[in-house]
Each structure stands twice: as structure tokens, then as C-alpha cells.
Image (cartoon, helix red, strand yellow):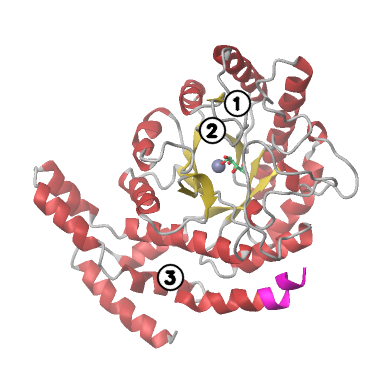
């Protein structure tokens, strides 16, 4: 799009917003300072780089067989850089343990070391990215239905050791990048059918977590992620929402809210103001559940919008880490990254442009009609002109122009895999 046109539209939008008391230049700066944490696993359907990676397990599933999946570290890195070139701003990369540089050697999960991520640390630094991290309990012969809550002491010890080592990896990442690495613990533990020892597995999980989190670190931050159920584990989830909220608030640690991990009519956004009163920060996995925790590509829908608005309304931009978590194997995977990232940023931008001061005054003085009217009108304010300016400033394609860029990369690179 023509620069001149974007600048013109921005100037008009700037005036329109100024009339409502909103400084669009300041909003652009705030958006610039807010990174997303891009999940590395959209590029390769959550396969990772273990030499003999088996089928995806742990109650999660990718569907689709679109050509061009990244098959190795070089392809994955190239794809992520390509995606990043279409996403305005500087972002973080969220790695799973199975994406370590293991070479041809079999390094079991209880043997992982910071050395396996040295290459990632260097690569991230060279590309101006910071890293976040995740332990990996799925897709492993010892995963079964229970990992950290397994009654077999040997299996449980194995996963405790894995998780402890992952925290050491995260610490090394955080230290190297001079900024805390956020490490997420999500384990799939649960059971398919009616479970009678519900308390027992939760006791085991609590004990495992206590052992894992016993080591204090300075350069990493832990978060724990619950869910409702996994595929094949429909009747009971050891790490339920109640379990982790209680656990995290007792230990003063972060909870991860995955937007696909709640009952369909439950609002993830509404959880922020409660959690932030009792836990220090929050990690998000922004996703799009369609009928279930389907991990569709995030879009600019009411749920994502509500979530971003709530971060701003809670004045919690410095306490909420905005990670993405979806894996769609049915469309161009780089395109999936770009759509979901830009959608999340568009929602955040609209949240930042909200005439919040006036809305709050209306609410506090009981002016319900005025509040609803302004909320409705705000939806059609010229936020898109501000968005286009953000893309222009960041030298990334404006509007749908990125489609051609992704098609070209597909033609030249991913279609040849
Ligand atoms: C699974 C959780 C978890 C995973 C990733 C791969 O339901 O959402 O966060 O998606 O760790
Ligand atoms: Zn998640």
C-alpha cells in the first residue's frame, strides 16, 4: 500500500482518537514494547528433533497434512524467521524440550542439559529474540497416561528429573539473554474412564512439583498449565484448573491460561483480575478452540479481544506474558503463525485504543446506557489506520500484502520439502 495513503489515514485516525483523549503515538509505542511469545511447534506439528520422534501423544493432536512441515532445526529456524518478517515488532520464541539440538545421539528426557540449547541461545541472540521454554511430557515411551503423578516411583522420578533439568535449561537461557525465561509446565496426566483414586494422583503430582520447584533460580520464572481434558483422557485430569490455581497461589507462582482449556462458555479474560490479586504474573496460551480444545489458529474474535482488553483494563501489561499456542497442520504453517500473531496484536491494539477513562467514569456513576453506547461505537473507530501505521513503522507488509510473501516462500522453499 502507498506510504502516503497510510500516513494520511493515520493522521485522521490520530485526530479522531485525540478527541476521545487517546494518544495514538503513545499507543503505538506501547504496542512496540509488548512482545508475543511465538510457539515454535506450529512449524512442525509438535514433532521436535529427537532422533526417533514417534507419534504425538499426551492427549493432544494435530490434524491436517499440508505440505511443507519443517523437518529439522534449520528448516524450523528459517520458517520462524520468515514468519517473524511478516509480524510487526520484536518477539520471543517459546521452545519445547524436544526441540533441543541432540544431533544423531539419543539424549533421553532425563539427560537434557543447557548444552543442547546452546545453539538456540546463540541463534536467538543473533536474531534479536528472547527465549521461553517448556518441559515435554508427551510423545515418549514413558509418557503413558501418567507422568509426574505416576504411582510407579521410577517413572515419576524420571519425569521429575526431566522437569528439574528443563528448569536448569530455562535458567541458562534467561541468564544468557539478560531477561527471565518463562518456563511452562504442562503434563497431560489423566485417565480415560471413571477414576477412583483422584486424590492419590493429585497428591503425587503435588509432591513431584514440590521436588521440581525446590531449586530457586534467578533468571527463569515458572508457570503451570491446567486443562479440562485430553483426547483419550476424558474423565479425569490430574492437573485441573482448581489444582493449579491452588498450587500456584500457595507458592506465589504463575498460572498459564490456555484459552482452549476451559469450558466453552467460560471466559478466560475474566480470570485475569482474580489471578493477579493472588499470583505475581500470568502466562497466556492464546489459541482458538472450535467445539473443543482444537488449537485452531488464533483470530480476531470476541474471545481474543476480551482477553487483550482485560489485560489493559487490569493495567497488567507488565504482568501478563502473551504466548501463542495452536497447531494447524491443514494450512500453510508460516501463514498460520502470521495470522495468529497479527490477530493477537490487532486485538491488543484495539484494547490500547479503548476510551477507558470515560468508560470507567460512566460505569462508576451508574451510566449504563452511556457505557454500552461508547463500547459499541469504539468498535468502529479507525483502529485499522493505526494498525497499518504500526506495520509501516515496522517495515512489514501492510494489510493482506503478506499473503503474496508467504505464497512466494511456499513456492521457493516449503513446497520443495
Ligand atoms: C496442551 C497444552 C500445551 C501444549 C504445548 C505443546 O493442551 O496446551 O501447552 O499445547 O505445550
Ligand atoms: Zn497450552
- Residue that mark 2 sits on: 229
The residue at 27%/57% (across/down) is 354
| Mark linked to residue 94 | none
Mark-to-mark CA distance, 3 and 2:
39 Å
Tell which circle, 1 or 3, labels the residue nearer the N-terminal end: 1
Q: Tell me the quarter of the image containing the C terminus.
A: bottom right
Mark 3 or 2: in front is 2
> Residue 37, image x and y in percent?
56, 51
Quick one: SS at disc 2?
loop
> Residue 186, image x and y in percent?
60, 34
Mark-to-mark CA distance, 2 and 1:
8 Å
Within-10-Å neighbours for mark 3: few <14, some 14–19, many 20+: many
Mark-to-mark CA distance, 1 and 3:
44 Å
Q: Is residue 402 above or below residue 64?
A: below
Q: Is residue 224 above or below residue 304?
A: above
- Residue that mark 3 sits on: 390
- Residue that mark 1 sits on: 190
> Residue 111, image x and y in percent?
82, 33
Decide which of 265, 127 is in the foreground and name it. 265
User: For residue 241: magenta?
Assistant: no
Does mark 3 have its CB less than 8 Å from ligand 2? no
Q: Are marks 2 and 1 in contact (CB under 8 Å)?
A: yes
Amino acid at each position: 500500500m502507498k506510504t502516503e495513503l497510510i500516513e494520511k489515514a493515520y493522521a485522521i485516525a490520530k485526530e479522531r482518537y485525540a478527541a476521545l483523549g487517546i494518544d495514538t503515538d503513545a499507543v503505538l509505542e506501547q504496542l512496540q514494547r509488548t512482545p508475543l511469545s511465538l510457539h515454535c511447534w506450529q512449524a512442525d506439528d509438535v514433532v521436535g528433533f529427537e532422533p526417533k520422534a514417534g507419534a504425538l501423544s499426551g492427549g493432544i493432536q494435530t490434524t491436517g497434512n499440508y505440505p511443507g512441515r519443517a523437518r529439522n532445526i534449520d528448516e524450523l529456524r528459517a520458517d520462524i524467521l520468515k514468519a517473524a518478517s511478516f509480524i510487526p515488532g520484536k518477539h520471543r520464541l517459546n521452545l519445547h524440550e524436544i526441540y533441543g539440538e541432540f544431533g544423531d545421539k539419543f539424549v533421553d528426557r532425563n539427560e537434557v542439559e543447557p548444552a543442547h540449547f546452546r545453539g538456540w541461545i546463540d541463534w536467538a541472540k543473533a536474531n534479536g529474540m528472547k527465549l521461553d521454554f517448556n518441559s515435554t511430557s508427551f510423545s515418549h515411551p514413558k509418557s503413558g497416561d501418567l507422568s509426574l503423578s505416576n504411582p510407579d516411583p521410577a517413572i515419576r522420578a524420571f519425569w521429575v528429573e526431566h522437569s528439574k533439568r528443563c528448569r536448569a535449561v530455562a535458567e541458562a537461557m534467561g541468564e544468557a539473554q539478560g531477561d527471565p525465561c518463562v518456563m511452562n509446565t504442562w503434563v497431560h496426566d489423566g485417565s480415560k474412564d471413571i477414576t477412583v483414586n483422584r486424590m492419590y494422583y493429585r497428591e503425587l503430582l503435588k509432591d513431584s512439583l514440590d521436588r521440581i520447584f525446590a531449586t530457586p533460580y534467578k533468571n527463569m520464572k515458572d508457570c503451570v498449565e491446567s486443562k479440562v481434558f485430553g483426547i483419550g483422557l476424558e474423565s479425569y485430569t490430574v492437573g485441573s484448573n482448581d489444582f493449579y490455581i491452588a498450587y500456584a497461589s500457595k507458592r506465589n507462582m504463575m498460572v498459564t491460561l490456555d484459552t482452549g482449556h476451559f469450558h466453552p462458555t467460560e471466559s478466560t479474560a475474566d480470570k485475569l483480575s482474580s489471578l493477579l490479586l493472588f499470583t505475581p504474573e500470568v502466562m497466556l496460551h492464546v489459541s482458538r478452540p472450535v467445539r473443543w480444545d482444537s488449537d485452531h489458529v488464533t483470530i480476531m474474535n470476541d474471545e481474543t479481544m476480551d482477553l487483550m482488553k482485560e489485560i489493559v483494563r487490569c493495567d497488567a501489561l507488565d504482568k501478563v506474558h502473551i504466548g501463542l499456542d495452536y497447531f494447524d497442520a491443514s494450512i500453510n504453517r508460516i501463514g498460520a503463525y502470521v495470522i495468529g500473531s497479527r490477530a493477537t496484536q490487532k486485538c491488543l491494539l484495539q484494547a490500547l485504543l479503548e476510551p477507558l477513562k470515560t468508560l470507567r467514569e460512566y460505569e462508576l456513576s451508574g451510566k449504563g446506557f452511556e457505557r454500552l453506547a461508547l463500547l459499541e461505537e469504539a468498535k468502529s473507530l479507525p483502529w485499522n489506520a493505526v494498525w497499518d501505521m504500526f506495520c509501516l513503522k515496522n517495515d512489514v507488509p501492510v494489510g493482506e500484502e503478506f499473503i503474496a510473501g508467504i505464497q512466494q516462500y511456499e513456492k521457493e522453499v516449503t513446497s520443495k520439502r
